[in-house]
Amino acid sequence: MNVFRLMLLVAVIFLASCSGDDNPPEEEKSSSQTPAPVSQQLLPNSWKPSSTFDLDHGQTVIGIQGQAALSLRQPFPVGEPTRVEWFFWGEEQELKEKTFSVIGVHENEKSVEKVLIDPENELLLWMNSEPIQVTGQAAVAKAESDLFFSKAGLWCLNVYVGNQLYGQIVIEVE
């Protein structure tokens, strides 16, 4: 009889563990995003906004000349999606058709947040859905994305191409 009870207990535990929800949770929207703790590697050396410079065709960008930059918006708005162009320099082969991702860190919060947003469904993303396109112009490649910032202040944008950190851009969001 004790063996029967033990087998029954094992069967109940097994069935209880299998009854979990098989559907993964839906991506978090901006209103419910919980910031994660930040690694020292994601913090900039200085919280001074990155340099601005003009591209050959006259467009003003903010970032690191010769690495990565994005189109300058004065100011970058808080709480609403903003379309930007990204510019990348480097070897064409290392950029062509690659995806890029951005990890945002707010100066006061010192926590990582998703800042790329899909404009169609307002889901925050780690990785941009559009691949980098080679341009053959001053910047070797470019891409577009929408950014969303949950709060005002200084933000460090850690830009990755593939799995490689391509640059850290500090911007002000108002």
Image (cartoon, rainbow, N blue to C red):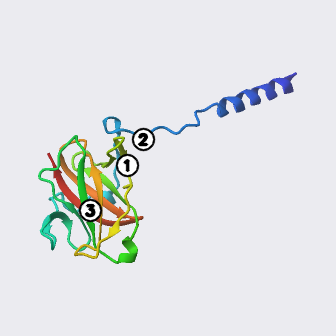
First reached walking from the N terminus: tag 3 or tag 2: 2
> Is the C-beta separation of discs 2 and 1 under 8 Å?
yes
In the rendering, which numbered label is found on residue 86? 3
How far apart marks 3 and 2 lie (CA) works out to 24 Å
Report the residue at 24% width, 52% height from top: 83
Residue 115 image offset from top left, x and y in percent: 30, 49
**Dot 1 amino acid type:** Leu
Disc number lying in front (3 or 2): 3
Which class describes the residues within 10 Å of circle 2: few (<14), some (14-19), or many (20+)? few
| Figure check: 12 above or below 81 | above
The foreground one among 74 and 167 is 74
Task: State the residue position of label 1.
Answer: 125
| Figure check: 61 above or below 125 | below
Task: State the residue position of label 2.
Answer: 27
Report the residue at 35% width, 38% height from top: 29
First reached walking from the N terminus: tag 3 or tag 1: 3
Residue 24 image offset from top left, x and y in percent: 52, 39
How far apart marks 2 and 1 lie (CA) works out to 8 Å
